[in-house]
Image (spheres, rainbow, N blue to C red):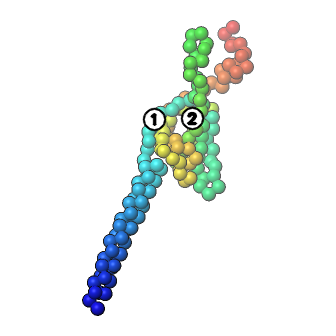
Amino acid sequence: MKAFDKVGEEVQQRHRKWRKIRNIFWLVIILGLLIFVAIRYYCPYSDGIKSGQLEYVHREGVIFKTYEGRILQSGVRNDENEVIILPSRFEFSVKNKSLAERLMRAERQNVEVHYTKYFGALPWRGDSRFVVDSIISITLVERDDIVREVLQLPTDET
């Protein structure tokens, strides 16, 4: 009988050892996934300031209603009228409702905003990895000058 008890005890010890290894393995996997999710979705990658003409800000979403917007950044030309930097678009999500409403009232104006960039987007934070968290400045644009420039109309000075 003692031989069977000894064999049974050895088997139980091996089971305990493998159970411990298995539990440690799953703990490492779960901790790794939690760290990955925390870094990807909650740790800011970078932040900065973008400026340009605010094209739009609107509220969208089926389950999570978020505010999304776009800023048109003008290009740069040299003295010979050659394009040095092409115009680009900056698409972003807005952090809170009051900030979004202020931006909605500033559509087609020149704005300067502070943003935070994340590695990934979350549905309740918006569609974009860029999240605007403050407005630095809003500059009014003279609409008459824009119309003259687009239609190439002569100015009043000529």
User: Could you tell me the amino acid type at mark 1?
Assistant: Gly
Pick the front one: 88 or 107:
88
User: Could you tell me the amino acid type at mark 2?
Assistant: Phe
Would you place residue 149 above or below residue 4 in this image?
A: above
Q: Residue at 31% x, 87% y: name it.
A: 4
Which residue in the protein does label 2 denote?
90
Pick the front one: 17 or 69:
17
Pick the front one: 152 or 29:
29
Instruction: Check disc 1: other Cα within 10 Å, few if <14, some if 14-19, many if 20+.
Output: few
Q: Residue at 51% x, 47% y: name it.
A: 120
Would you place residue 105 above or below residue 21 in this image?
A: above
Q: Residue at 47% x, 37% y: name it.
A: 114
Precedes in sequence: disc 1 or disc 2: 1
Pick the front one: 135 or 130:
130
Would you place residue 29 above or below residue 147 in this image?
A: below
Q: Secondary structure at mark 1?
A: strand
